[in-house]
Every structure is written in C-alpha cells, then in structure tokens.
Image (cartoon, rainbow, N blue to C red):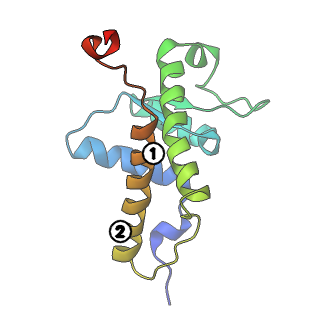
Amino acid sequence: MKCPPEWGVTESQMALEQLKHLEEEGFSPTTVGADKNYHNGPFVAGCRGEGIKPHVAPITGRKVAGLDGRTTRSKGYQISQTIRKRAEQIFGWAKTVGGMRRSRYCGAERTDAACKWVVSALNLLRLAKLSVSPPPAVARA
C-alpha cells in the first residue's frame, strides 16, 4: 500500500499550502496566527514570501529570520495572539470537560454531531455567565 503524498508533509508545510489555496479561492489573507509549532524558518519564510505577516507564538531562545521584535511588538501581533488564545481555550474546554480528547464514536458524521453537542453546551454555559443588568424601571422598584 502506497502512502498518500500528504503523509510526508509537515504541519507547517501543509499550512503554507492551505494559505496558497485560500489565495487561489479569492481570499487575500494579510496575517496568520499560529502556535509555537510554527516557529520555524521555512514557515516564516514561506509566509513572508506570500506577503503574509506570520503572527507566530515564539519559542524562547530560538531565532528565526523574519520573526523578530518588530513583528512581536506590533499592535496587530498582540491582538492576533489574544484572539488565538481565546480560540485555543474553546478547544481545551472541549477536550477536558467536554470529553472530546478522543472520540467515542466511529465515523465522521457521529463524531461531528458529538462535537456540535459539546460546543453547544459550552455556548449555553457562556450565555449563563453573561451578566445582564436589569432595566432601569425594574431597578428602581
């Protein structure tokens, strides 16, 4: 049995291919946020070559050309990392509390349905935690 060609591709190489695919589909990303796994030379150079600013979480002590203090001190980089952290928290909750670290179902359809149930439960919890002040008329009564 021959392995598919994408099995020999690293995660950061596949991300670059996906960015190129987005451009072919008519999207023009200007930045891309990524975690520490993408703090490597080929990914940063590939993004820069496509005209995309890589907002990659840096690994302490690792120097990568094209990702220096000018990038990490920018306002856009800080916003990108804050938003990325919020998204990662959702995945972390789904894995730990929602039981989605490993699927208990066979098949993509059932696993997809289970993921939707878990995310729906998270949204209900988030809605319940919203603090809404009572209308002014009720507050005076």
Q: Who is closer to the viewer here, 53 or 50? A: 53
**Residue at screen point 56% across, 64% down:** 99
Q: Amino acid at mark 2?
A: Ala
What label sits on residue 103 in the rendered view? none
Q: Amino acid at mark 1?
A: Leu
Label 1 crowding class (10 Å Cα cut-off): few <14, some 14-19, many 20+?
few
Position above or below: 35 against 106: above
Q: Is residue 10 visible?
A: no
Picture coordinates of residue 78, whole percent (x, y) = 54, 19
Q: Is residue 92 visible?
A: yes
Q: Who is closer to the viewer here, 65 or 129? A: 129
Q: Who is closer to the viewer here, 91 or 39? A: 91
Position above or below: 125 against 96: above
Which residue appears farthest toward the front when viewing the image? Answer: 141
Q: Which residue is disc 2 drawn over?
A: 113
**SS at mark 1?**
helix
Label 2 crowding class (10 Å Cα cut-off): few <14, some 14-19, many 20+?
few
**Residue at screen point 31% across, 13% down:** 141
**SS at mark 2?**
helix
What label sits on residue 125 in the rendered view? 1
